[in-house]
Amino acid sequence: MTGFEITGASAADMLLMRDWADEEGWNPGDSDRYAFAVADPAGFLVGRLDGEPVACISAVRYGAGFGFIGFYIARPAVRGRGYGIRLWHAGMERLDGRLVGLDGVVDQQDNYRKSGFRSAWNNFRYEGAPQDGGAEEGDAGFEIVDAGTLPFGLLAAYDRRFFPAARDAFLSAWTGLPGRTALAAVRDGHIEGLGVIRPSSAAHRIGPLYAATPAVAAALLRRLARHAPDGTVAVDVPDANPAAAALFEGLGLAPAFETARMYTGPTPDLALTELFGVTSLELG
């Protein structure tokens, strides 16, 4: 391990981590790193070999009791040499004493189980251009509005139903960054859905996608897809909500990628029947 050291990530490293994730086929959002940085500025680690970045991981703290592992990548040229596992231990040490979650690709899930993680559900990335049809918001009694026009406290309280800890700073950046669109479904002053679309190197990514009913989810999805150049979008859909996969398949989207949401302890009590798309595979 001579010449290998672990440091905090710089702004340039954050861009590099995004490019590495893209090379792995994860298709992160173009501007995700800006929201990631405010979630936990010290939560991104880079392994350097003789000064050159060769591996990375994020170990982001939320509140006092939750953390999330992501961006766990060792460059192909150094795999199998122990650098990745050293970085893994550094990330997990940073989250010691917390419930920890991650979204694991299929070929790494056994390794995560050896580290104490247990599967909670699977995420299937659905891609395509949603077909027209079904009730629009006016017909179903709800209205779709720019989420930025709502009091932020309402958005944060709504998001809290779907995530194990408060993440106000992250959510503010995630919904408000230039180039992305955040829409909320509102009925009688209450939020019944929230969706965010952001540019990516391939299909525009939608996440989160929360909705009280499949009809609300479908209306949000179609409205968000209008902001993709060719209407093609990608959503990471949890199979913990059986209605979600049926909805996306009915709208003409097809599964293209799979991960497992895993935790080191009990699965958090979340509103899974209203979760139609997770926010991010990197930060939960």
Image (spheres, rainbow, N blue to C red):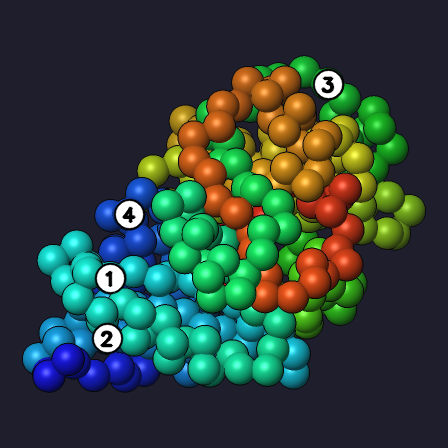
Cα–Cα span, label 1 and label 4:
11 Å
Cα–Cα span, label 4 and label 3:
36 Å
The residue tagged 3 is 134
Residue 35 picture location, percent across and down = 47, 66
Residue drawn at 63 percent across, 51 percent down: 120
Residue 249 picture location, percent across and down = 59, 21
Amino acid carrying label 3: it is: Gly
Q: Which mark is residue 74?
A: 1
Residue 108 picture location, percent across and down = 39, 51
Residue 11 picture location, percent across and down = 29, 75
Q: Are marks 1 and 2 in contact (CB under 8 Å)?
A: yes
* 13 relative to 219, above or below: below
The residue tagged 4 is 24
Classify mark 4: residues with Cα within 10 Å, few (<14), some (14-19) or many (20+): few
Q: Nearer the viewer, mark 4 or mark 3?
A: 4
Cα–Cα span, label 3 and label 2:
49 Å
Q: Give the mark nearest the N terminus, 1 or 2.
A: 2
